[in-house]
Image (cartoon, grey):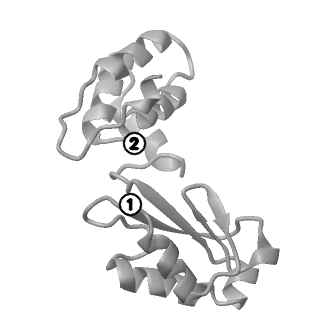
Amino acid sequence: MLEDTLVSIDETLDMAPLDEVIDQYIGQQGAVIPVLQRAQGIYGYLPAEVLQHISKRLQVPMSQIYGVATFYAQFYMAKRGRNTVRCCDGTACHVRGAARIISTLENNLGIKAGETTPDYRLTLEVVYCLGSCGLAPVAVINGQVVGRLVPEKITELVRELK
């Protein structure tokens, strides 16, 4: 599948897989969002070069492409880590110590929430409800819910990530 061909750190962008996607949407109304979704699946994020290519091929102004890409939270304009840790700071998690979990991660990783480590090993995000309040404080690590966290436990879990 095209979406499984993520770009490595040192690789230049190959637009051929993107062109295959765009070819399926040429001339269709409402093509911008699905093309952006598929492009992000290919490259892992939406670099400026990809947005410009989409704009040119779909004949949609760059301002519109950029506007859509920055409006929706599902789109990422910066390269993301191989691993994603989403820490909940909703009410139940906050009351049960989420701030300590987030602070511990920020200190151990040397990044702030919303950032990615320089080696692209991990992206740290803060969200405001994961729907697992009974397990608070909670995080989702690469799609897996982990609850009843304490700083030592989150440190160990993140250390195990490759």
Helix, strand or loop at disc 2?
Answer: loop
Would residue 32 be visible to someone looking at this image? yes
**What's under tag 1, amino acid-wise?**
Lys
Q: Is residue 33 left or right of residue 130?
A: left
Look at the image and tell me in which quarter the C terminus lies.
bottom left
Tell me whether the residue at label 1 lies in contact with that at label 2, contact meaning CB atoms closer than 8 angstroms.
no
- Measuring from the top left, give residue 24's x and y in whole percent: 48, 11
For label 1, the crowd category at 10 Å Cα-Cα, with few meaning under 14, some 14 to 19 and many 20 or more, is: few
What label sits on residue 132 in the rendered view? none
For label 2, the crowd category at 10 Å Cα-Cα, with few meaning under 14, some 14 to 19 and many 20 or more, is: many
Would residue 64 be visible to someone looking at this image? no
In terms of depth relative to the viewer, which is nearer, 134 or 154? 154
Of the numbered discs 1 and 2, the one sitting upstream in the chain is 2
Residue drawn at point x = 25 percent, y = 35 percent? 49
In terms of depth relative to the viewer, which is nearer, 102 or 57? 102
Q: How far separated are the C-alphas under marks 1 and 2?
A: 17 Å
In terms of depth relative to the viewer, which is nearer, 113 or 28? 113
**What's under tag 2, amino acid-wise?**
Gly
Helix, strand or loop at disc 1?
Answer: loop
Residue drawn at point x = 67 percent, y = 74 percent? 138
- Measuring from the top left, give residue 26's x and y in whole percent: 45, 11
In terms of depth relative to the viewer, which is nearer, 146 or 30? 146
Residue drawn at point x = 46 percent, y = 72 percent? 158
Please give the residue where the numbered disc 2 appears in the rendered image. 44
What label sits on residue 162 in the rendered view? 1
Q: Is residue 83 left or right of residue 19?
A: right
- Measuring from the top left, give residue 159's x and y in whole percent: 42, 73
Residue drawn at point x = 28 percent, y = 31 percent? 52
